[in-house]
Image: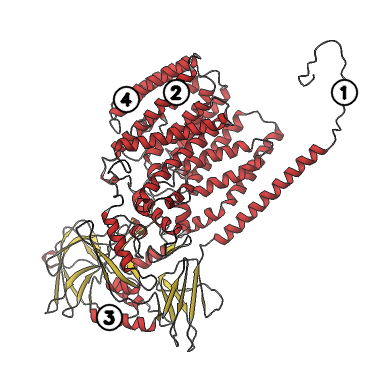
Amino acid sequence: MKTRLAGPGLAAAIAMAAFVISGGLRGTYPFGDRSRAVNDLGNQFVPFHAHLWDLLHGTSSGDLFFNWNSAFGVPYWADFVSFLGTPFSLLVAAFPRRQVDLGVYVGECLSIGLGAAVMALWLRRLKPGRWWQAGLLGAAYGLSGWTLSDGAFDPMWLWGLTGFPLMLLALDRCTRERGWLWAAPMVGMAWAGNFYTTLMAAVGTAVVGVVLLATREWSRTGLLRFLGRTALTFALGTALAAPVIWPSYLAAAGAQPIPALPYSRPPPLEYLLQLLPAQWGFGSLPRFFVGMLALLLVLAFPLSRQIPVRTRVAWCLALLAVVASFCSLPTVKVWYGLSLPNGSPYRATFVLAGLLVSVAWLCLAHRPRPGPLLAAGAITCVLAAASVRNENGVSHLTWLVVLGSGGLTLGLLLLLAGKRGARLVGAALAVLVLAESAASGVAVDQQRHKLAFYTPKPTWGARHDAVREAVKRVADWPARRTDTGPPEIVNNDPQLLGGEGPAYYSSYVPKQTAGLLRRLGYSWTMYGRHLIPQDNPVADAIFSVGARIRHTDAPARVRAERFPAPPLVTVHPREAPRLPPGSSVFAHQQAALGHKVYELPRISFAGAHGNAPLRASGPYRLTAAGAPYRITARCRPGSRLYVDGSWTDAMLAGPDGRFVRLWGERPEKAVATKPLGTVPADGRVTLTIATVFQDTELTHSPLACLDPAVLRRAIADLRARGATHVAAGGHSVRATLPAGSTGTAVIATARTPGWRCAVDGGPMRAPQSRLGMLAVPLPDDATEHQIRCSFRPPGLRAASAASAGAMTLLLCLTAFLRRARRERARAPDTRQRVPRVCDGRRSADPTSP
């Protein structure tokens, strides 16, 4: 048992130590002032873990089913199981909330260590060998190029490091006559940790399964049993994790659509050079280096004659097949469920790293001879020479690791082949693997941070404290919402700092939510996967926003303001206004509010030299050559002027001469409504589109004038006719309406699938949609109505039933097999005993005494 656990322990220790040391050498948090929160780590994972902290400590307004903090209320189950499904996410509860970054970092370290440890277990199941050798290669897998370049900044992906060898161990279980049913919960555990990376791990497991079929001796009965066990246990394991897989699939299918990035085949030379550690080539590449120890062994593997030819051929073909699969769009899609991801198409590269380590282990376990090792060293020198002419990602650390550590590693392997000083060689190799893994982490970080895209988000500091304290002072949920304002810190500020604002960035933004907020004038990027607040009092009234945080130039000072807001549940006429296609944002806002609060003026629009821009299907077409454009209109003096430049990419000068930059680009980026000041005393408004940065468009009704007094009367009317009491649970809403309320009760959240509502204790039914918002028809009587709505993730009930059925079947099979073994053990031995003839010679039967 000690040696069985020593290898995984060594792998985890080296991998985690190297990860920590590389962070210390780079001066990143918590070892220095430099934040680790790059890209999605800062914009998604840190705020998601902060929200999880609130859930675990009972301070959140939502629960695991629904998130009231983001986008005015969105489903949360898919976010939770995808971004926070790994067991190490729960560690954040043990840290102070302002140190949630540290909790995420510790979870990353443990995820890497667990992946390295489970890989070490798999290696010794693949082929018996020394524990410390398995530990070294497990550590090399844990800190592969994929981990340092991709996985470390998406903690949910790090579960793939564990999921892949865990599935391989399940596959190995299926080759046994006893204990093979344990494969099912192992598969379920892999899926439950993160179903996205486990999908890629499942494809890699299929590749290894084909290799096992080709390299092992199978009888016909044994082969059929293996295939049957594999199919049964993997199906049961997948069904066990159905509550994670199926609702997440439905949530992804119902998310705001986003086009995949164009596929780009990796350049052959740069692809090949990814074998070399301590380098990070710019651009989209499969990054799979696994250190010099594994590299030398992989290169020596095809030349090692002590390994059976069939084994060498099968594993080499498997490696080549996986390498080639990243060079063709159809095979790339196989790794991601036949769809191309929006981002790097090489997220499955950790599987290639695992296969490389498996091949290296087979070579090491067969005790490679000096000849193949020297040949491997020569090939490495050729690769190093090729990298001289390719400066993409190569630095002085690359040469130090490849030539320095590589030369020492080759010498130690030659000593090991000569069966000299195995313990000293093992200790020296452990030090080398640790040192070069840390150096690789530093090299990757140095290269990556040359790009502005990888500028990190700040760790928790004075600005975080100021905003969070301000939110706490004015918070009054569910009586009103608090908006943290524009994304000052990360794209998910409401989850990080508190409040119930519209900001939200996730792969699971429901298309109903994105569409509703866009129609009402909110900004978005990433084709609607990132929703951004707007500063508009009409939109605030629609969504019951009664407090807002105003940021200042001083990092530790913010200003909180309160203002009247309707309740979360309001009453409107039974029939919603019908808006013609192409209606303006302002028309949609008035329809959702139920009151006319804007003056929509007729405008005069002229381009350069007095020419009016052409209009096609409504919007004005703007070109750089036609600029500047001039817009004139008349509004009530003293009203507030707003512009809707949803898809406009231009510089606009308002009536007071102040410039406003519009960054719209249909359909990727949408601009929120912008305030342009107060209409002057003569009522005449003149705007100038000074610069058009690219061919763009302006909506056919781009201006609106808001009378604050009219809006105040509208809010007062909604408060008078709205709910007298509102209670919001984790995924539910209860409201009491005034006596005599008729028409439709509207809850200020998007009508997404999964809601069920009841009136006055009646049956729960699917609610209606009123202009995209959650709506419940009211009966025509004079009583005081009670409304109750509850949300359940779509598909969760059916998935839970499938999981329960799989668990029941698994328990029944376990009991049946155990009973069958007991009956065989109790049955008398009826085999006919053949008397042996003693002729004075030693029996050839090895079982005889």
Q: CA–CA distance between discs 3 and 1? A: 104 Å
- Numbered mark located on residue 712 in the image: 3
Which of discs 2 and 1 lies nearer the camera? The answer is: 2
Residue visible at 29% across and 41% down in the picture:
32
Q: Residue at x 37, y 76 (%)?
A: 567
The amino acid type, in three-letter code, at marker 2 is: Ala
Q: Marks 2 and 4: in contact by CB < 8 Å?
A: no
- Which residue lies under the disc numbered 2? 427
Name which residue type carries label 4: Leu
* Place of residue 505 in the rendered image (x, y in percent of width and height, measured from the top left): 36, 57
Of callouts 2 and 1, the N-terminal one: 2
Q: Is residue 213 visible?
A: yes
Report whether 326 appears left or right of 612.
right
Quick one: label 2, few (<14), some, or many (20+) residues within 10 Å?
few
Residue 487 horizontal side relative to residue 789, left or right: left
Q: Give the image location of residue 95, x and y in percent.
A: 40, 50
| Residue 9 x %, y % | 50, 33
643 or 151: which is nearer to us? 151
Task: For marks 2 and 1, give the CA distance.
Answer: 56 Å
What residue is disc 1 on? 834
Residues at circles 3 and 1 in contact by the CB criterion of under 8 Å: no
Residue most toward the top? Answer: 840
Location of the C terminus by quadrant is top right
Question: Where is 473 relative to 849, above or below?
Answer: below
